[in-house]
Image: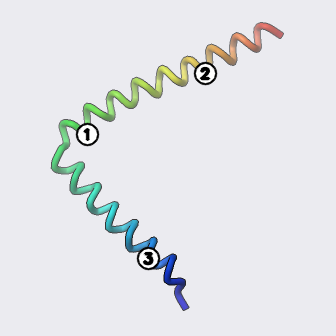
């Protein structure tokens, strides 16, 4: 027997994936801009993290 909550979550997840994919398809240029910005933010955060770790390693 299939769990009804699990089946509902699976169906809702598939619907959201399809809607999100369709939305991304409609707004491809904006999606690319957001991804570029996100990559920049992630690079800054990783650099900050590495700098802090390097500072603490040198302090020891």
Q: Which of marks 2 and 3 is nearer the N terminus?
A: 3
Disc number lying in front (1 or 3): 3
Residues tagged 1 and 3 counted as in contact (Cβ below 8 A): no
* Residue farthest right in this picture: 60
Residue at 40 percent of width and 66 percent of height = 13
Residues tagged 2 and 3 counted as in contact (Cβ below 8 A): no
Check disc 3 and report its element: helix, strand or loop.
Answer: helix
Residue that label 3 marks:
8
Check disc 1 and report its element: helix, strand or loop.
Answer: helix
- Marks 2 and 1 sit apart, C-alpha to C-alpha, by 27 Å
Q: Earlier in the sequence, mark 2 or mark 1?
A: 1
**Horizontal side, residue 2 vs residue 23: left or right:** right
* Residue farthest left in this picture: 26
Crowd class of label 3 (few under 14; some 14 to 19; many from 20; radius 10 Å): few
- Marks 1 and 3 sit apart, C-alpha to C-alpha, by 29 Å
**Where residue 25 sits: x, y (%)?**
19, 50
Residue at 46 percent of width and 28 percent of height = 42
Residue at 18 percent of width and 37 percent of height = 29
What mark, if any, has residue 49 been given in the picture?
A: 2
Total numbered badges shown on the rendered structure: 3
Quadrant showing the C terminus:
top right
Residue 36 lies in what quarter of the image?
top left
């Amino acid at each position: 027997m299939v769990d009804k909550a699990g089946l509902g979550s699976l169906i809702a997840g598939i619907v959201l994936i399809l809607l999100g994919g369709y939305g991304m398809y409609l707004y491809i240029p904006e999606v690319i801009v957001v991804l570029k910005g996100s990559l920049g933010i992630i690079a800054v955060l990783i650099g900050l993290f590495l700098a802090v770790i390097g500072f603490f390693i040198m302090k020891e």
